[in-house]
Image (cartoon, rainbow, N blue to C red):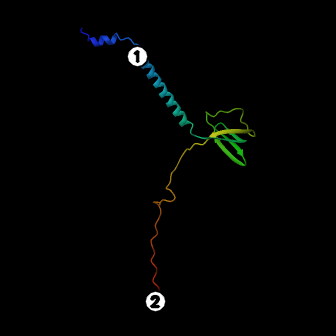
Amino acid sequence: MNIPPTFVKVLRFKPGPALNAMMKTKLLLSLIGAVSLTASSAALAAGAKSYQVTGTILEVKPTMIAVQKDGDRLEMDLDPQTKVTGELKVGSTVTITYVMSATKADASAASGAPSAAKKEEPVSSPSPAPTP
């Protein structure tokens, strides 16, 4: 069997200082890329502003809590990721931290733009004056 000499050189290749420096550079660039990707993902995920409301608990269900704040009844959904500290009981005071999220968005034409559904009324001509 005839083996080309270049193949034999590849098999006898020993990594030297130049290869180690190149590998370290590639590793460093890969780590920088991974960190920047992770940081940008975290920045996008943290886009929603959080709010707080403190009030009296009116009603508690496994998936919902109703709170009275300044005479208004506020109902909020609870999901499995909601962290609850203490016991939620009717009549207790609670502070809820929440974010607003949309479940549906219906866009309509701008008020200044002409509407396609607008009906145009026929122009009426003046009636002729009666003759004596």
Q: Which residue is mark 1?
A: 18
Residue at coordinates 54% horizontally, 33% vertically from top-left? 42
Q: CA distance from mark 1 to mark 2?
A: 112 Å
> Is disc 2 surrounded by few (<14), some (14 to 19) or many (20+) residues within 10 Å?
few
In the displayed structure, would residue 45 be above or below residue 123?
Answer: above
Quadrant of the drawing holding the N terminus: top left
| Horizontal side, residue 14 vs residue 75: left or right | left
Residue at coordinates 44% horizontally, 77% vertically from top-left? 125
Give, as a three-letter code, the residue at label 1.
Answer: Ala
Residue 32 in the image, given as x and y percentages of width and height: 49, 27
> Is disc 1 surrounded by few (<14), some (14 to 19) or many (20+) residues within 10 Å?
few
Tell me the number on the disc at residue 131: 2
Residue 76 lies in quadrant: top right
Residue 83 in the image, given as x and y percentages of width and height: 65, 33
Q: Nearer the viewer, residue 53 or 61?
A: 53
Give, as a three-letter code, the residue at label 2.
Answer: Thr
